[in-house]
Amino acid sequence: MTVAEAVAGAHRDGWALVLAATVRVVRDVDVAEECVQEAYAAALVAWPVDGIPANPVGWLTTAARRRAIDVVRRERVHRTKLALLTVPESEPLPEPMPVLDERLGLLFMCCHPALGPDVQPALTLRLVCGVSTADIARAFLVPEPTMAARLTRAKQKIAKARIPFRVPPAAARPGRYVLQAAIAALYAQAPTFEETDWPQLLTLYDELLRVWPSPVVALNRTVPLSRVHGCEHALRELETLERDVRLGGYQYLPAVRADLLERLGRRPEAAESYRRALALTANEPEREFLAARLAALA
């Protein structure tokens, strides 16, 4: 393995761990990122001479933490420049959390409600996954300077609002994200589509709709509803949702309606709904799927 391959692998597998361990020391995201980047740059210089270490991520974590400690000591007299610095002069630097907790702490910091849903995914991709700003900008269909400014504002918000780097305590009523994860897990773990635990999914969707009353959640709920209580019941729910203007151009509404109608044997109406869904869909794989379902009706 070449040094370049080793560094690339350590970036892919260990970026979040190295950054989380460094944030734990310096309590400032921008400074921590700089320390981690310096550690990776140092690896490109040191490893060709000293050899690739047995634990590349461990080497990088140690190097980045040492740089962070130097920053903390050097800037201790300028605490106002590091809004999140919480290491007192008389106290030792904090012991690292368990590896999983460190990465989870970084993830929860990126997804803190104070940052807003528009920036949380982008900040997570940058800090937790180590994706470049340019690649994130392309994924979000915005210019790179726009994304860079968005990420900078998010980091400033972390410092100004003193958003903690920690795993929050377990909630007493599961929240929106826990419920969404549970729903995704049930779908993923089902041995077959037919063996999906539809009653449990319906229960989870009922609770999700209670904590997050979104028309999209209500639409998604009609899928397990149709499997538990029948297509006619689900269609009645769908008719109510069709009066919601927020779903006026939402392609999945006619797609769900088409499926329900097809399962009821109402083929002409199903075909019309598939055509409506096709007209609203720009995603090519989805268009191919809908076109195949429409063709099957013919």
Image: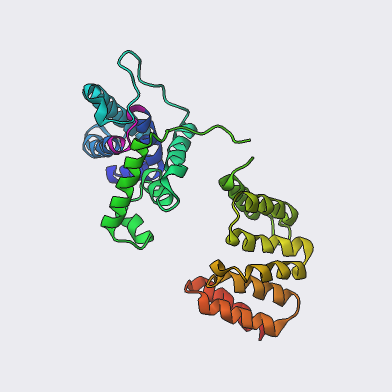
Determine the image quadrant of residue 63: top left
Of residues 176 and 57, the one drawn nearer to the viewer in this rendering: 176
Q: Is residue 280 above or below residue 221?
A: below
Q: Is residue 273 above or below residue 130?
A: below
Number of marks present in the image shown? 0
Magenta-drawn segment: 25-32
Q: Residue at x 29, y 44 (%)?
A: 2
Q: Is residue 154 above or below residue 255?
A: above
Q: Determine the residue located farthest toward the top in the rendered image.
A: 90
Determine the image quadrant of residue 88: top left
Q: Which quadrant of the figure contains the N terminus?
A: top left
Q: Determine the residue located farthest toward the right in the rendered image.
A: 229
Of residues 200 and 56, the one drawn nearer to the viewer in this rendering: 200
Residue 166, position as x, y percentages in the image: 46, 32
Q: Which quadrant of the figure contains the C terminus?
A: bottom right
Q: Residue at x 30, y 37 (%)?
A: 36
